């Protein structure tokens, strides 16, 4: 049996389980299931917004891809003002961040990779080109786009060293899908070599750099920091340690390090932002069991006194992490003390504050290497090293300034990926 027919049969067979999964997630998180969009139905208002207009469609899976896509969306808006921009996402948190950004004219969920859902959305949108962020490669979607002569581009492409063996094992599956792309822009030479090894067309694949380096960056002025602290009801005289995007098994060492730091720096506040907001109750229980007072971000306005020293400000909202980094003195980037691959170190670096992170940075090897090479952060192996490194920064404002400035220099030296991606897109549109 042809593999593509087998794939379509398997996706149809898996559809009931996918529906149950999305239904459970929507109920457990108190969000709309949006099954209509996942089956390719655009809301009427969105259809009217796109009707008769040339459209560029960008797909970003979740929060990380949406954030990476911000500079590209801004570049598209400036370079092609006559085009409407459609942004599709897969996750609820990705959509929340996308809607806050308001960088696209229409935001929708990416359809299930089944024939009738994909065809319905492609026929409704009729995009001039489709830009897919990183490694979202869907066989039915790419086939139907190619059948309609819609150019497909891969932007900010990456294949981690950890996932590469799995991709290579199924190269027979990915090769025909990759051949449908008109252009593949990879983050690094290592990413290029890996995608070529699994079947990407050599003549259409190139290194364009990492879009994440093109995020806006600037040191936080004193008045901006003061306004942000006032907004979050944080006293100006507190030192603030922001721990973002933490995962299960990571909050315990972070909170233990915080308790140790409080003995040396009593005028300290911890901001703790779990990667998945649905885990907030679990994290709150952990903090309270250690005797730490907790206030949730969503309930901050109900507090008579705001934030105090020794407290944990627990972030149960989406899309505020960059502001929280901006008001902080020091950041820890999660997903790195536990083996989940890490998260983007450039977000706190762009606000000119020093960064701490753990040993598990498999998904961000290039950024990690540059962060260490520029002296923009410190890699730690566990709770005690996290505590000791944070103590060094909190005790030495001059060190915080130097390391934070190094992060800004890293971003200044590493930009340009947006222009290279736009050049690839322009070549396709000209055709």
Image (cartoon, helix red, strand yellow):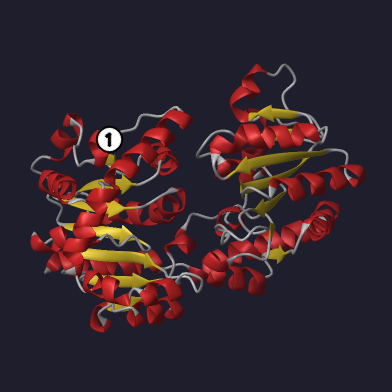
Residue at 72 percent across and 48 percent down: it is 329
User: Going by the image, does 108 lie left or right of 66?
Assistant: left
- Counting every numbered tag in the picture gives 1
- The foreground one among 215 and 41 is 41
User: Going by the image, does 159 lie left or right of 282?
Assistant: left
User: Going by the image, does 290 lie left or right of 315?
Assistant: right
User: Secondary structure beneath disc 1?
Assistant: helix
Indicate the position of residue 199 as horizontal and vertical percent values: 29, 79
Instruction: Point out the image quarter for the N terminus.
Output: bottom left
Say whether residue 95 is visible. yes
User: Going by the image, does 237 lie left or right of 345?
Assistant: right
Indicate the position of residue 34 as horizontal and vertical percent values: 30, 33
Residue at 18 percent across and 65 percent down: it is 4
Q: Which residue lies furthest to the front in this view?
A: 1
Residue at 56 percent across and 54 percent down: it is 347
Above/below status of 344 relative to 93: below
Residue at 54 percent across and 35 percent down: it is 278
Say whether residue 311 is visible. no
Indicate the position of residue 19 as horizontal and vertical percent values: 32, 39
Above/below status of 337 relative to 26: below
Residue that carries the numbered disc 1 in the rendered image: 35
Indicate the position of residue 143 as horizontal and vertical percent values: 16, 62
Q: How crowded is mark 1: few (under 14 residues within 10 Å), some or many (20 or more)?
A: some
Instruction: Point out the image quarter for the C terminus.
Output: bottom left
- The foreground one among 206 and 112 is 112
């Amino acid at each position: 049996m042809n593999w593509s027919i087998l794939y379509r049969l398997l996706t149809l067979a898996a559809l009931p389980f996918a529906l149950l999964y999305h239904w459970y997630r929507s109920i457990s998180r108190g969000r709309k299931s949006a099954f209509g969009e996942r089956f390719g139905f655009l809301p009427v208002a969105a259809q009217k917004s796109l009707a008769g207009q040339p459209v560029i469609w960008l797909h970003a899976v979740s929060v990380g891809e949406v954030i990476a896509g911000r500079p590209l969306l801004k570049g598209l808006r400036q370079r092609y003002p006559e085009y409407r921009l459609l942004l599709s996402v897969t996750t609820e948190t990705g959509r929340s961040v996308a809607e806050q950004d308001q960088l696209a004219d229409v935001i929708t969920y990416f359809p299930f990779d089944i024939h009738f859902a994909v065809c319905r959305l492609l026929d409704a949108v009729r995009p001039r080109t489709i830009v897919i962020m990183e490694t979202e490669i869907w066989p039915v979607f790419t086939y139907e786009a190619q059948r309609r002569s819609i150019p497909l581009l891969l932007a900010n492409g990456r294949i981690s060293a950890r996932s590469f063996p799995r991709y290579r094992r199924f190269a027979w599956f990915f090769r025909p899908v990759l051949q449908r792309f008109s252009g593949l822009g990879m983050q690094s030479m290592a990413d290029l070599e890996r995608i070529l090894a699994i079947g990407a067309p050599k003549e259409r694949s190139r290194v364009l750099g990492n879009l994440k380096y093109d995020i806006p960056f600037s040191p936080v002025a004193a008045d901006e920091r003061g306004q942000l602290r006032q907004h979050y009801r944080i006293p100006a005289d507190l030192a603030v340690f922001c721990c973002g995007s933490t995962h299960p098994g990571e909050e315990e060492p972070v909170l233990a390090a915080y308790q140790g730091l409080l003995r040396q720096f009593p005028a300290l506040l911890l901001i703790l932002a779990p990667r998945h907001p649905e885990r907030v109750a679990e994290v709150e229980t952990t903090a309270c069991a250690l005797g730490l007072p907790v206030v949730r971000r969503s309930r901050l306005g109900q507090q008579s006194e705001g934030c105090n020293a020794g407290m944990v400000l627990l972030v149960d909202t989406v899309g505020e992490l960059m502001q929280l980094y901006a008001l902080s003195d020091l950041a820890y980037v999660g997903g790195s003390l536990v083996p989940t691959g890490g998260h983007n170190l450039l977000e706190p670096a762009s606000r000119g504050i020093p960064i701490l992170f753990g040993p598990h940075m498999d998904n961000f090897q290039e950024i990690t290497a540059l962060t260490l090479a520029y002296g923009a952060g410190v890699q730690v192996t566990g709770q005690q090293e996290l505590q000791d490194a944070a103590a060094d920064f909190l005790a030495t404002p001059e060190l915080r300034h130097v390391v934070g400035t190094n992060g800004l220099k890293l971003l200044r030296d590493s930009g340009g990926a947006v222009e290279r991606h736009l050049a690839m897109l322009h070549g396709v549109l000209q055709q």
